[in-house]
Image (tube, helix red, strand yellow):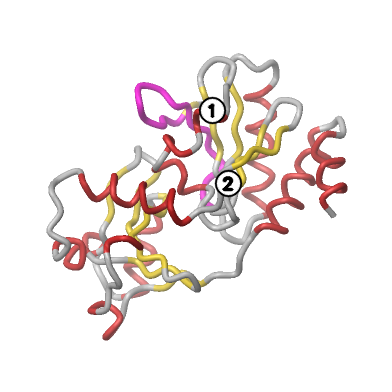
Amino acid sequence: MAAMHSLLFHLPGLYLRILGVIAVAMSLVALRGFVIPSGDERRSLSGKSRVVPVVKDIGWLSETSAADGRTPFEYAHEPLNEQLVIVYAEDRSSRIRYLTRKEVAAMDLEPGQLRALAAANLGNILPPVSLRRGNAVAMVVAGGDYEASLLAAPELWSAKMAAEGELVVAIPARDLLLVTGTGTPGGVAQLREAASTLYREASNRLTPDLFVYRDGRFTRID
């Protein structure tokens, strides 16, 4: 299987590269539930060491809140940019439990400490981050659950890229982080097409948009 992944990912043609990305991603995904806190679970936070950042599209807040009978404000979150939010959750090894602002307030953290804490925890929880490189686009591999959420902690992986020009990323699904550089010939165009295709195929889709890492933040690019 690994040999097939490598072959598919390096064969010429965008379609075969996309197949390679899908095959690798599917083999890495762990089947874990993402649940909303309820009942006694909201009072049983196991500790600060399991708090992690989860990157969502901004529409997730209103959709999930409507389904759960809450207001978007009740979930512990902060903006990543105009299209994406960081939602804070507790990693319970077999599932993820989203936290409320009340739970986070009880941690007695200073302003700005929550994201740093969650990013550090993510680094401790994840296996070593690696890259699967194609001709112009690479895939960041980190266990199959938190690849998209690595946008909340670029210090954990961006140095591995050595991108030509500025770093450009796509997170078409929760378990996919694809990267290229603005100076890589054909890289942005290939990344855009791959993101669009994978977004349509994904069951846990996020966004087909591309984001450039500039001035310490990820900004959407047209």
Determine whether, in the image, residue 151 is placed left or right of residue 40.
Answer: right
Q: Amino acid at mark 1?
A: Val
Residue depicted at x 29% and y 66%: 99
The answer for how far apart the CA atoms under marks 1 and 2 are is 13 Å
The image position of residue 183, as x and y in percent, is: 60, 14
Residue 210 magenta-highlighted: yes
Tell me where residue 37 sits by quadrant: bottom left
Depth check, front residue: 45 or 13: 45
Q: Is residue 169 visible?
A: yes
Depth check, front residue: 114 or 15: 114
Q: Which mark is residue 47?
A: none
Magenta stretch bounds: 206-220
Circle 1 SS class: strand
The image position of residue 98, as x and y in percent, is: 35, 66
Residue depicted at x 54% and y 43%: 171
Determine whether, in the image, residue 43 is placed left or right of residue 122.
Answer: left
Circle 2 SS class: loop
The image position of residue 101, as x and y in percent, is: 20, 62
Q: Is residue 56 visible?
A: no
Q: Which residue is mark 2?
A: 172
Q: Which residue is mark 1?
A: 168
Residue 150 magenta-highlighted: no
Q: Amino acid at mark 2?
A: Pro
